[in-house]
């Protein structure tokens, strides 16, 4: 499900003005094709800004002005046009360009063909010319080739471009909270906020732990009761089990998690947050330590409703979670837990919040007497990701400061997992666990990733193109 505003897509078709007086009705026919294409784009969820059919260099300049501010330009090659009457439009629009090489019919009647009929079907003729001109003008572009016919594979690719444009538009408008600081010493996670702003367009809102503590303290009884009821509705409650650090879920523990969840909701509302990265160590059981120890359940609820939360102050993985969520794939905060060389899978999970909307079955709350490597105790979340195709997406940073996407597709498979109050899933990749880990680490990753459902590489490739970020694919 898409969250947020639809992608704003600019569309213009092209043709050659010299054809219109020569072939009566040709222009009107091509305009009809373009109007049908635009209607289909609206059905796919796009906000369409149409610059009409462009057939001269002067009209191209006017089209470029009309398309200013769009997220994506779809250039429909209705028939042949010279590149000089197309280039001004994309130069002025200043948005990523996808050339739609969409022929009206899958095949032509060669014996009965006329010049006019050919010109109504020669979408491909100018595409190489445009590609050459755009390359020399340093204008990035992609092509989608196929037909206007329903069911053509080209429409799946167009849908992926719209999904990617939606995710990128959402990211560029996002307010990502950064609460506290990074887990001390995790150098892979340290982020340059200025570069995040510059390269993604997202705003990083730096928050104090006091901002959350004050809202937790101010939560009224009705708000706490609502969150308690939501936790009972969304989660199963686990018995302690075999782990000696597990404990009973007491009414007091449930009430505290509900109170912190109410404070988190207020924090998100007051600062208009679309995502949140957090970590705070606390000291000797002080108020800050108690609050942060109680955020896991509330953060899981936030993530499920489209405000992804990442622990340990991992802003970069929060971006990956946000992108997968806006692509409709979820995106759960995850790391590599262990390798199983007998059954050939990677165990992946994390302590803390998870995307409970993509859980396989009902997620579980388990009380822990302590959090390993962290201060405090409280309720933690346990589940595995929905079985079937999955995608992992990481956001790392290169030595020169550029953000970098790293992705791979796999499968979430059935089988026992840990019952220690952590998310954990069996993920099988085509390479096998040893080869996969070696290949993944070649790309300088952050140790966390976002884990989402479905195979999403087609969309992720397009997201990377729209953000102008490097993408490494491990397949």
Image: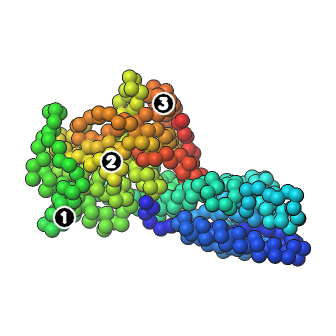
* Residue 405 shows in the view: yes
Q: Secondary structure at mark 1?
A: helix
Residue at image coords 32%, 34%: 415
Image check: 393 left or right of 299?
right
Task: Mark 3 or mark 1: name the one nearer the start of the chain.
Answer: 1
Which residue carries the number 1 mark? 226
Q: Nearer the viewer, mark 2 or mark 3?
A: 2
The alpha-carbon separation of the residues under discs 3 and 1 comes to 44 Å
Label disc, if present, on residue 436 of the rendered structure: 3
Please give the count of numbered marks on the rendered protein. 3
> Going 36% across and 62% down the picture, which residue do you hit?
273
Q: Is residue 373 left or right of residue 156?
A: left
Residue located at (31% from left, 51% from top): 356
Point out the residue furthest to the left here: 251
- Which residue is label 2 attached to? 359
Q: Quadrant of residue 383?
A: top left
First along the sequence among labels 1 and 2: 1
């Amino acid at each position: 499900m898409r969250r947020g505003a639809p992608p704003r897509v600019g569309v213009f078709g092209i043709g050659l003005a010299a054809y219109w007086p020569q072939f009566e009705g040709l222009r009107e026919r091509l305009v009809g094709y373009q109007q049908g294409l635009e209607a289909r784009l609206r059905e796919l969820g796009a906000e369409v800004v149409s610059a009409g059919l462009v057939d001269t260099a002067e009209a191209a300049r006017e089209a470029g002005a009309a398309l200013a501010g769009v997220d994506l330009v779809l250039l429909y090659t209705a028939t042949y046009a010279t590149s000089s009457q197309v280039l001004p439009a994309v130069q002025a629009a200043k948005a990523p360009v996808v050339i739609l090489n969409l022929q009206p019919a899958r095949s032509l009647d060669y014996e009965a063909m006329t010049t006019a009929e050919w010109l109504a079907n020669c979408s491909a003729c100018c595409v190489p010319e445009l590609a050459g001109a755009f390359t020399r003008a340093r204008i990035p572009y992609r092509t989608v080739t196929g037909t206007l016919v329903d069911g053509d594979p080209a429409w799946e690719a167009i849908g992926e471009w719209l999904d990617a444009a939606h995710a990128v538009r959402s990211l560029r408008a996002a307010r990502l909270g950064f609460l506290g600081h990074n887990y001390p010493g995790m150098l892979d996670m340290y982020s340059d906020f200025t570069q995040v702003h510059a390269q993604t367009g997202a705003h990083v809102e730096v928050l104090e732990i006091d901002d959350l503590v004050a809202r937790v303290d101010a939560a009224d009884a009705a708000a706490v009761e609502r969150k308690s009821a939501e936790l009972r509705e969304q989660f199963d409650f686990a018995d302690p089990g075999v782990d000696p650090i597990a404990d009973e879920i007491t009414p007091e523990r449930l009430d505290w998690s509900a109170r912190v969840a109410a404070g988190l909701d207020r924090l998100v509302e007051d600062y208009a947050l679309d995502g949140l990265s957090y970590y705070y160590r606390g000291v000797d059981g002080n108020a800050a330590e108690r609050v942060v120890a109680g955020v896991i359940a509330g953060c899981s609820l936030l993530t499920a409703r489209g405000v992804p939360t990442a622990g340990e102050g991992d802003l970069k993985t929060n971006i990956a979670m946000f992108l997968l969520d806006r692509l409709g794939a979820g995106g759960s905060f995850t790391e590599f837990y262990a390798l199983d060389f007998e059954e050939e899978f990677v165990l992946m999970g994390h302590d803390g919040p998870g995307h409970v909307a993509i859980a396989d079955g009902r997620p579980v709350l388990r009380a822990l007497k302590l959090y390993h490597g962290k201060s405090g105790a409280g309720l933690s979340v346990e589940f595995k990701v929905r079985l079937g195709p999955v995608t992992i997406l990481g956001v790392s940073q290169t030595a020169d400061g550029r953000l970098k996407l790293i992705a791979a597709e796999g499968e979430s498979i059935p089988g026992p997992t840990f019952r220690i109050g952590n998310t954990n899933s069996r993920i099988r990749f085509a390479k096998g666990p040893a080869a996969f880990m070696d290949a993944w680490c070649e790309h300088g990753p952050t140790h966390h990733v976002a884990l989402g459902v479905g195979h999403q590489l087609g969309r992720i490739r397009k997201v990377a193109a729209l953000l102008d970020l490097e993408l490494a694919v491990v397949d």
